[in-house]
Image (spheres, rainbow, N blue to C red):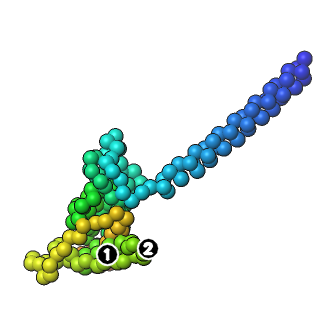
Amino acid sequence: MRSERTELNQKIFILHRKEFGIFMNKFFFTSFAALILLGNTILAQEKYQIGSDLKNLRQTQGAYFDYSDPSGVNIKVQVWGYVKYPGYYVVPINTTLSELFSFAGGPMVDAKLEEIRILREVENESVVMTKYNYNDLMWEENLKSEIKFPVLEAGDIVVVPGEPRYFIRQDISFYLSILTAVISSAALIISITR
């Protein structure tokens, strides 16, 4: 009786394991198919967009920012580099570079504002790079050169290069920590020898 029950339990266990395996195969196949369909949808995005979906007026997951005009024509541009919020932006068609910087949270302290670049695809499918210098705008009391804020076009890539700036306070804190350790060691040696 006990061996029959054990044998029955083993058969039930094997049956459940097979059903679970079939379920997992269906689940993974369905998930894979959904991923492929979703991937094709994401890759098929256009540079221009008319209006916007009001329920997704501002979506900020994955560095995608929607500042579009719900009733107008919008363009898609990218911001790379040393701005507070780099990413993919949907903005109204006549947006200037200064407005895009405002949307992106402004340049960071480490940004090289004398080398701001706009990469733009032209009609023959080549890319043209235009450089702008906005260093006066942020760091000088008076403008040394005329500042132009170009109007962005669909597909533009704005690159704000930069590198960490050197601040003397970094050296001061480093040497101060070494000096503190030396003074503490000297005080300890003096107190032990007395």
Mark 1: which amino acid? Arg
Q: Position of residue 80 (x, y in %)?
A: 36, 67
Q: Nearer the viewer, mark 2 or mark 1?
A: 2
Give the spatial CA distance, label 2 vs label 1. Answer: 18 Å
Res. 29 in view: yes
Task: Say if 137 sits above or below 64 in the image.
Answer: below
Q: Nearer the viewer, residue 37 or 165?
A: 37
Quadrant of the frame with the C terminus: bottom left
Task: Say if 69 sits above or below 184 in the image.
Answer: above
Query: For the residue carrying disc 1, how many other residues have a C-alpha within 10 Å: few (<14), some (14-19), or many (20+)?
Result: some
Mark 2: which amino acid? Glu
Name the residue that disc number 2 marks. Answer: 125
Q: Position of residue 171 (x, y in %)?
A: 28, 78
Q: Position of residue 5 (x, y in %)?
A: 85, 21
Query: For the residue carrying disc 2, how many other residues have a C-alpha within 10 Å: few (<14), some (14-19), or many (20+)?
Result: few
Quadrant of the frame with the N terminus: top right
The numbered disc on residue 142 is none
Specify the quadrant of the image occupied by residue 192.
Answer: bottom left
Quick one: label 2 or label 1, which is nearer the N terminus? 1
**Figure label count:** 2
Task: Say if 19 sits above or below 143 in the image.
Answer: above
Task: Say if 24 sits above or below 135 in the image.
Answer: above
Name the residue that disc number 1 marks. Answer: 117
Which residue sits at x=53%, y=53%? Answer: 40
Q: Nearer the viewer, residue 163 or 73?
A: 73
Q: Position of residue 18 (x, y in %)?
A: 77, 35
Specify the quadrant of the image occupied by residue 109.
Answer: bottom left
Which residue sits at x=39%, y=72%? Answer: 123
**Side of 79 relative to 135 (left or right):** right
